[in-house]
Image (spheres, rainbow, N blue to C red):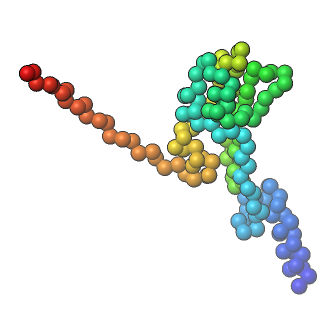
Amino acid sequence: MYSRLLVATAAFILAGCESLRTWTPAIIQPYRPDVQQGNVVTREMVEQLREGMTRDQVRFLLGTPLLTSVFHQDRWDFVYYLQRGKGDERQLRRLTVFFKDDRLARFESDEMPPEKLADNLILGRKPKAVPQAPPKEPEPPVTIPAR
């Protein structure tokens, strides 16, 4: 009886070790939540950025920046980081906005996901294919009869 209890206790203690995650059954492995930090920025949001926008307009569009520096007051960094609790999937995306005279001068961005896929990426769902609308046929020209 004592040896069975010792083996069961050792199994639960070792289940927390990272190197043993691959061969231990899922029921013994500890719960690891997804870690999500930063700003969710989509491709559509980046496409709306225009030179000359005020700081308030950029903040309204993108939200409060994750990183601001006292030493670089004309630079805002929007960083998004996601690590899945199960598996080794990691996402890291950056958007850096530069101001000059309190107006947007330029920005640098990683490839951002489209808005339709961003929720699925965050929630861990496999993104479904976005249905494409069939191409529209050109409408015949409208002719107005002469009087």
Does residue 106 show up?
A: no
Residue 8: x and y, percent?
A: 84, 74
Does residue 58 show up?
A: yes
Query: Residue 54 versus residue 37: which sits nearer the camera?
Result: 54
Q: Is residue 117 left or right of residue 25?
A: left
Task: Tally the numbered discs.
Answer: 0
Identified at 89% across, 75% down, the residue is 6
Identified at 86% across, 80% down, the residue is 4
Query: Residue 143 versus residue 147: which sits nearer the camera?
Result: 147
Residue 87: x and y, percent?
A: 69, 52
Image quadrant of residue 32? bottom right
The correct choice, above or below, for 132 with respect to 12 in the image is above
Q: Residue furthest front?
A: 147
Location of the N terminus (image quadrant): bottom right
Residue 5: x and y, percent?
A: 88, 78
Query: Residue 70 versus residue 111: which sits nearer the camera?
Result: 70
Identified at 83% across, 69% down, the residue is 11
Q: Residue furthest bottom?
A: 1
Residue 19: x and y, percent?
A: 80, 55
The correct choice, above or below, for 8 with respect to 106 in the image is below
The correct choice, above or below, for 146 with respect to 43 in the image is above
Location of the C terminus (image quadrant): top left
